[in-house]
Image (tube, rainbow, N blue to C red):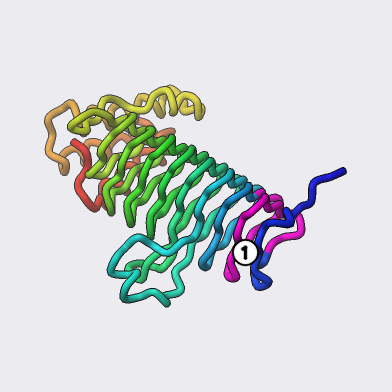
Amino acid sequence: MTEPRIHPTAIISADAELDSSVQVGAYSLIGSKVRIGAGTVVGPHCVIEGQTTIGLDNRFFQFSSIGAISQDIAHATQHADFPAQLIIGDRNTVREFCTFNSATHKEEGITRIGSDNWFMAYVHIAHDCKVGSHTIMANQATLAGHVHVGDWAVIGGMSGIHQFVHVGAHAMIGFQSHVAQDVPPFMTVEGHPLAVRAINSVGLKRRDFSAARLDAIKKMHRALYRDDLTLEAAKTQIAALSESFPEAAFDVQTMLNFLASATRGIVR
């Protein structure tokens, strides 16, 4: 006998919008403003609430809390009726005991999570965060409010990211790191105090970065961390790499855009 698509012990609001293919496990609760796209599987004992929109083919393992109001005290006490949202893309894997919060009134009112991400157990994503696609967050990795994480970034287990920090695309953060400054794209950081150790060469090779692109990224690393340049001088040197390495022009621009928008100063 086939298992029911919606377990009889699950409680789903009549106003929730679930695609006919969505599966919901035992004792899960889904609130009235939740929308869930085709192919998504919600495991047992999950709570999905608030104004939460979930895309296609996601999988939520047991005991996750998705879409609850923020832990921002000022917002919770003064703006409880603000229409804060959580928007999640497609094909994300969310393991046990993860907590993803909705936004506050302080930015656009949306916590955004992209697609094809892998979130291990006990990951916390706080209010107003922006997480790209193809990221990996290991067990107990924690994002404070307003953190931005670029595509393909990897955040090691038990690492804490301070509020408003930006983590660049393809960056890697080592185990148990305390990250209080912005992490530039392509770099590997770890240690106490936090420091850039090298480029994320293993990750970049796995993503088929060519030798020319890797060489350009190594030169960006040298300009920022080895040549004893001021940040402005390093930016000038990095910008010139587009002529020497036309194949890496996009990577160079990615770095320059990140440095121009850094909010807390880069790890240096």
| 29 part of magenta stretch | yes
| Quarter holding residue 82 | bottom left
Disc 1 designates what residue?
A: 35
Q: Nearer the viewer, residue 235 or 13?
A: 13
In the rendered view, tell whether residue 116 sits above or below residue 174: below
Quadrant of the rendering where the N terminus is positioned: top right
- Residue 199 location (% of width, % of height): 33, 27
261 displayed left or right of 246: left
In the rendered view, tell whether residue 234 sits above or below residue 262: above
| Quarter holding residue 20 | bottom right
Q: Nearer the viewer, residue 234 or 11?
A: 11
- The amino acid type found where label 1 is placed reads Arg
Residue located at (49% from left, 37% from top): 120
Q: Please say whether residue 223 is visible from this viewpoint.
A: no
- Residue 152 location (% of width, % of height): 46, 38
| 79 part of magenta stretch | no
Which region is colored magenta?
18-41
Q: Nearer the viewer, residue 219 or 66?
A: 66
58 displayed left or right of 6: left
| Quarter holding residue 234 | top left
Q: Secondary structure at mark 1?
A: strand
Q: Nearer the viewer, residue 262 or 148?
A: 148
Prevailing secondary structure of the magenta residues: loop
257 displayed left or right of 82: left
Residue located at (80% from left, 46% from top): 3
- Residue 43 location (% of width, % of height): 63, 47
Q: Residues within 10 Å of mark 1 (few under 14, many from 20)?
A: many
Quadrant of the rendering where the C terminus is positioned: top left
- Residue 76 location (% of width, % of height): 35, 69
56 displayed left or right of 85: right
